[in-house]
Image (cartoon, helix red, strand yellow):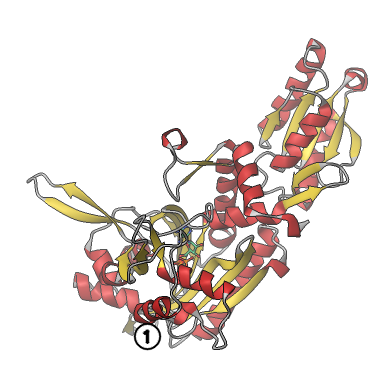
Amino acid sequence: MRANVTLEKITALAKRRGFIYPTSEIYGGLGSSYDYGPLGSELLRNIRDLWWRELIHKRTDMIGLDSQILLHPQTWVASGHVDEFNDPLVEDKVTHRRYRADFLLEDWLKKHPQPEQLSVEELDIDRIGELLVKFDIKSPEGNPITEPKKFNIMFETAIGTVTGEKNTLYLRGETAQGIFTNFKQVLDSTRLQLPFGIGQIGKSFRNEITTGQFIFRTLEFEQAEIEYFFDPEKTDWRTLFNNWQQTMWDFVVDHLGISHENLRWRRHTDKERSHYSQETYDLDYIFPFGFKELWGIAYRTDYDLKRHIQFSGRSLEYTDPRTGRNFIPHVIEPAAGINRFLLMVLCDAYREDSENQRTVLSLKPTLAPYKVAVFPLLKNRLELVEKAHSVFDALAGVLPSTWDERGNIGKRYYYQDEIGTPFCVTIDFQTLDDDSVTVRERDSMQQVRIGIGQLLSYLQQHLANG
Ligand code: ATP
C-alpha cells in the first residue's frame, strides 16, 4: 500500500479531485506555486483549526496572535535575515537555469557514494564549491555550472510614502519575528506570566531556488509557529525542549493520524544549525522523495529579543512578579509548515485497494473535507430527491456534507473514497416506507441500515471514534 505512493500519483489525485492546482495555470503556471481547490482549502482549514485547538485553545499557557506580513524593515536586519538568510545558488552556463548547489551535490553523492562520509548540510559554501569542481558536477541538463554564490531568499518589495520616497520592505520570511516584536505588548495587555507561549499561523515567503517537489517547497507558504518564553533560571530548557518534542510527535501521530514508522527525529549538527539556535531538531516525515523536514524545533535562547532590544532601543525585559528581577526571557520555537502537513497527510492516507479496484484517502474524520455524502438512489425520482434533500439539510448544518446524484451508486462511492469522505448515506425506496437509510463506511465498505431519527447521532459517534 504505502510502497505504491509516488509524488506523481499524489499530484495527479490532488489535481483531479480539486485539492491542489498549479497557480496561474492558464498562463503556463508559476514556478513553485500552487493554489488550493475546493477540497484542498477545506483540508488546509481543518489542519490549521486542529493545530490551533490542540496547541492554543486547549492550553492555559498559550495564546494566539496575528501579525502583519509586512513588518518594519529593521525587524529583518535585527533578526539577521537580511544578512544571513542565504542559499547557495549556481547557474547552468548554457540555459541560465538556477539550482541549489547543495541539492546538486546531494543528488550526485546519492548516485556516487564516496568513501568519506560527506554530510552536505554541514558544508559551507566554499567547500560546496570545491566539491562541485572536484567531482565535476554538471547541471541536470548536463551543462557546466557557475561557482556557487550566496542568494538571499527574502522577498523585497517597496512602499511609496506620502512624500514620494520609496522604502524597501520585505515579505516576511517567517512568522516568528512578528511574535518577538509584539512580545512586550502581549505582556502588557494580558495577565500572562512565564512560562507561556505565543502561537501564530500565517503566510511566509521565501525566494526559494527549487525544483519540483510539489507543495513541499514553495515561494509562498503557511507557517504555524510557536515562541515559548521562559525564565532560564527557573525552567530547565532541556526538559522543556523534550516536552515540546513529545507534543509535536503526539500531534502528528494522534491528531493528523500519521503512522509513527514514517517519522523520525534528526538533530542538526553544530555546523548546520542556524545562527540563532543552540539546539535544533527536525521532525522528519518520509515523503515519496525521502525523509524531509516537516516540523523544526529550535532553542533560540534570548537571541531574538536581545537583537530587537539592540535595534529598537526599547526594553523587552520581563520582571519577575515575585522577586522583581528583570531579565530577557529565553525561547523555544516549534515551527511547522501547514502545507507540508497537508502533503504528508495526503501521502500517508493514500491507499490502493486493488481487490476492490479503488483508491482510498483514509483520512482521519477530523481532517476529511466532507464528513458525509448524501445520495438519492435515482436522480429522476422526485420523491427520492426530495427526501434526500431533507436528510442533507438536517446533516449539513452540523457536519460538513456533500451531495451527489450523478451516475450510479458505485461511481459515487468510488469518488467519495478518493476524496476521503468517511460516510455515504443513500436514500432509496425503502426509505420512503420506513424512514431508514443505508450508511456505508469508507475503509471497511460495510453498510448498515439506520433510521433517519438516529442518523446524526450515529454519524457523530462514529466520526468521533475514527
Ligand atoms: P527547509 O530546510 O526545508 O528549507 P527550514 O529549516 O528553512 O526548511 P524553517 O525556517 O524551520 O524551515 O521553517 C519552519 C517550517 O516551515 C518548516 O519545518 C517547513 O514545514 C515550513 N517551510 C519552510 N520553508 C518552506 C517552503 N519554502 N515551502 C513550504 N514550507 C516551508
In the rendered image, which residue does mark 1 sit on? 323
In the depicted view, which residue is nearer to us: 140 or 50?
140
Quadrant holding the N terminus: bottom right
Q: Where is residue 6? Give x, y as percent.
A: 66, 54
Examine the rendered structure and indicate whether residue 98 appears above or below residue 435.
Answer: below
Give the residue type that dot 1 points to.
Thr
> Which residue is at 74% across, 22% downward?
406
Q: Within the image, what quadrant is residue 391 found in?
A: top right
Q: Secondary structure at mark 1?
A: loop
Q: Where is residue 209? Give x, y as percent.
A: 40, 60
Q: Is mark 1 within 8 Å of ligand 1?
A: no
Q: Where is residue 4? Give x, y as percent.
A: 74, 55
> Which residue is at 87% across, 21% downward?
428
Q: Within the image, what quadrant is residue 117 found in?
A: bottom right
Q: Is residue 380 left or right of residue 12?
A: right
Residue 406 in view in this figure: yes
Specify the farthest residue to the left: 163
In the depicted view, which residue is nearer to us: 316 or 273?
273
Q: Within the image, what quadrant is residue 292 found in?
A: bottom right
Q: Where is residue 320? Give x, y as percent.
A: 37, 80
Dot 1 alpha-carbon crowd within 10 angstroms: few under 14, some 14 to 19, many 20 or more: few
> Which residue is at 81% across, 24% downward?
408
Q: Is residue 306 left or right of residue 278?
A: left
In the depicted view, which residue is nearer to us: 90 or 386?
90
In the depicted view, which residue is nearer to us: 349 or 23?
23
